[in-house]
Structure formats: structure tokens, C-alpha cells
Image (cartoon, rainbow, N blue to C red):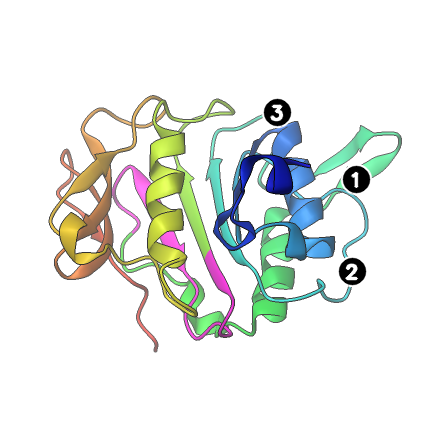
Amino acid sequence: DAEPLLGVDRENILFMGQSRGGHLIWELACHNPELGSAWAVHAGGYNGPLPRRCKQPVKFLHAHGTADKIVRFGGMKNVGGGIDMPPLERSLALLRKTNGCDPRGESPTDTTGAFIRYQYSGCARDGALELMLHRGGHNYPRNWFEVAIDWFEAVNSGPGQLPVADPSQRGKSIRFQGTASSGARIGTGSSGTRLNSSGSGSRFKSAPKN
């Protein structure tokens, strides 16, 4: 309805969801990916038995707090109506398979800071997959929307692009605030995508290919 009424560009739509909204985003991204051009979830997951493969490659960002006890990263029993939520690792493996990503892209370069960032490399032309973990719980960081939109603008700039800032944004960082330690930042620099914590001095860049 919004497309003809408001002149919505179907090629430039980001769907976002938190908690139950995140469950919905997982469902739509897997089974109705033609509705949007990218998908971002915080603290949600795929509910019910996982299919063997989703419909088509998608651009997908998942963020989660490692201390989340409401929607647990390791999965949950009976999230509603007797339906279980599989562990997020299995759901992400489903998207990795659908996107044709290299499984070696799962390893981060560092795990000592406030965040752990996983970028899956070698994805299909129309696919991208990234996981961001933070030390907080179920609530999303205060500027989660800004972080997700920054990711969307970068990853939607061309087919098969990993999240790397456009030239006008190079050197800038976005603060990922609220549930992580103070001073933690997420953003991009001149060498590509990175995550760093000013407290630890650690940096998270694109995962190595080997």
C-alpha cells in the first residue's frame, strides 16, 4: 500500500525488528525476501523448524546481547504455542548457506573488546551477512537504529558489497551506546569496517579469509 501512495522505492527498503519484531524479520527475510532490500534484527530469532534453505540470498545484519535472558542466543524452548527457537548459530548457518558465504568468514580478528563482529565473506552477489555481539542484555543500544542504517547504506551501495563506508564517511565512527561498556564504538575507518573499544584499544576488522 505504501509503495504507490508514498512513492516508496522498493529497491531501497530496510526492514528492522527488535525482540518479537526480530522474530518477524527472520521469517520475512527467509520466506518473503522480495518485500525489502535488506534486513536488520536485534534480539530476535527464527522460530520453529528451520527450512533446508531460505528463498534467496539476502542482506542481513543480526545483533544480540550475550547476556540476553529473554531471547537467548543459544535458543529457547516453547517461545509460544509450543514452538521452539533454534540456536542463533543454526539460523545464521542457514543464511550463510542460502547466501553462499564462505564459512571461514565467521571468525573475528579479536574478541577482547566490548563487541565481537563477524563478517561472512564470499557471499553471493545479492547477499551479505554480519553478526554483531555486545555484552548487554535484551535492550538494544540507544543508537541501534543509527548503526543499522549506516550498515544498510553501505551494504546496499552495490551488489555483493560488505559494509564499508562510502568516501564521505571514511574516518568517522558511530557510537554504539547503552548496553555495552562506556566508550565503545562501532563504525568504519579508512581501512574498512571496524569495531573498537576505547577502553581496551581493540579493533575488529573484516575477518581473515584463512
Viewer-nearest of discs 3 and 2: 2
Q: With respect to residue 123, does 119 lie above or below?
A: above
Q: Main secondary structure of the magenta part?
A: loop
| Mark 2 neighbour density, 10 Å: few (under 14) some (14–19) many (20 or more) | few
Please say if 4 is above or below 109: above
Q: Is residue 34 shown to the viewer in this render?
A: yes
Frontmost of labels 2 and 1 is: 2
Q: Position of residue 179 (x, y in %)?
A: 37, 24
Residue that extends furthest to the right in the rendered view of this protein: 81
Which residues are drawn in magenta?
A: 111-129
Question: Is label 3 in contact with label 1 (beta carbons under 8 Å)?
Answer: no
Residue ID for mark 3? 70
Asked if residue 135 shows in the view, the reply is: no
Amino acid type assigned to the residue bearing label 3 in the image:
Ile
**196 lies left or right of 143:** left
Distance, label 3 to label 2, CA atoms, is 24 Å
Quarter occupied by residue 31: bottom right
